[in-house]
Amino acid sequence: MPVAAGTGRERDGNDADVAVVGAGITGLALTHALAERDVTSVTLEAADEAGGVIDSKPLDDGLVAERGPNRVRLTDGIERLVDAAGLREDLLVADDDLPLYVYAGGSLREVPFDLPTFLRTDLLPWYAKFRVLAEPLTGDVRPDESVGHAVRRSFGRTAYRNLVEPIYGGTYGSDPDRMPVKHALPALLRMQGEHGRLLRPLLQRAIADREAPPPVSITGGLQRLPDALAARYADRVRLGTPATGIERAGERYVVSTPDGPVTADEVVLTVPAPAAADLLGGVAPTSAAALGELTYNPLAVVTMYSDARREGFGYQVRRTESLRTLGVSWHHSLFGRTGQYTAYLGGMEDEKIVEMAPEDVGEIAADEFEAVMDAAAHVRDVSIDRHALPAYDESWAALDRLDLPDGITLATNYTARVGVPGRVREAECVADDLA
């Protein structure tokens, strides 16, 4: 029988150093990192498939409905996971110099990522560009003010309405006026503390992002990554095995499952806040109540085929336009999936759309795509998730009440950085702490 690293205690299949709850990308990255550090672990996943929010459905003609993230940056952590999964030869690499647009005033207008584009784009009129450059004359961003208020005060109303609101608010499906800076944009405060003002570090960051690891996908869809990792660690990952409760057993924890209890020194929860709240009720009731207050935004994802042949990352939609679409990704030019476009609808301001029939949501997406792109679109897949995106709104103040007992860790997108690379980095940090 294997001996756990550093404990001298024999383990069996239901006894481990670490119990990981959730086999999304965070849980699987943690599983991989613990295995590399010779730490025994058991990963429990309620669904029959791994991946969590990474959810790919291959369609005909080489198209792939990405119902969750549609691309990731090939950071060092992602690269290590890709190699561990044996998928290096299946990477699809996008051109990071492709333009991104905002649909505003009836036209697609280019987002400025560099000075030449800033000078020529008609997304910001000349007076708004001068207002952006006046940011050093404004006061410091405050942790408790909203992202919307902070940006308007620092860069002006037009830059907020035409640039920040559609890109940032649209990405998270939230209203920036309801997103406190300290929860939604902690990096903004760090940059301000380091540089004194925001304009220069934001420009440097925008330029650096264009030199960052490229966006990638995987032939057949991003879900192949968690699927391959779950297969590699089949001796550690238990699919179709939900954790139903957590109890203290002396200095250890017992995680209940339908297949019997799992005993571990440490428990790491990588699941959404409502699921974590349910599990923590018996061992950390105050933290469970706090997590139960966090709100999520709904999202509808519509995969379409079109003969449109535009080159770019896609576009976000200004909120003042008469469209319900938040944005559209152009898989056609990103990853060579000929004719594929993915539209996103819903969010905090349009929750009712996810209560509609999928075919009606698809019709709205296709009609609005044609209005923007002047080309017909044919719906291939519609996915609706009523709790898709952490809102990072006022409810996040509840996190101040978190008081987890020793041996319980949250590794999640609502307590740390969002995005797949951020999830992988956190998983590696947690593994280092536990090892």
Image: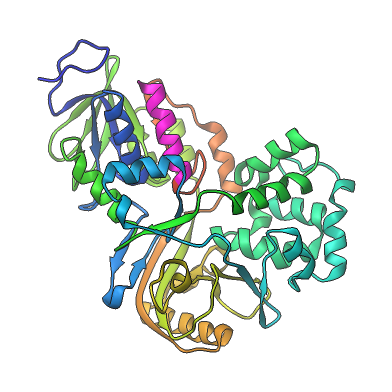
As drawn, 305 above or below 157: below
Q: Decide if residue 238 is on the left or right side of residue 425.
A: left
- Give, as a single range, the part of the protein colored magenta: 421-435
Quick check: is 67 in the magenta stretch? Answer: no
Toward the top, the furthest residue is 8
Residue 150 appears left or right of 76: right
Q: Main secondary structure of the magenta part?
A: helix
- With respect to residue 215, does 402 lie above or below? above
Q: Quadrant of the N terminus?
A: top left
User: Residue at left 41%, top 79%?
Assistant: 339
- Quarter of the rendering containing residue 89: bottom left
Q: Residue furthest front?
A: 89
363 or 373: nearer the viewer: 373
Front residue of 402/362: it is 362
* x and y percentages locating residue 430 in the rendered image: 41, 29
- Residue 321 in the image, given as x and y percentages of width and height: 66, 78
Q: Residue at x 82, y 57 (%)?
A: 132
Q: From the top left corner, tell me how far across and down residue 174 is, in percent.
A: 58, 59
The image quadrant of residue 338 is bottom left
Q: Nearer the viewer, residue 181 or 286?
A: 181
**Residue 345 appearing in the image:** yes
Query: Is there any visible trace of residue 278 in the rendered image?
Result: no
Coordinates of residue 393 in the picture (x, y in percent): 59, 50
Taking the spot 36% from the left edge, 40% from the top edge, the residue there is: 80
**Outermost residue, right direction?**
137
* Picture quarter with the C terminus: top left
- Lateral position of residue 57 relative to residue 398, left or right: left
Judge from the rendering whether residue 107 lies leftward or rightward of residue 197; answer left or right: left
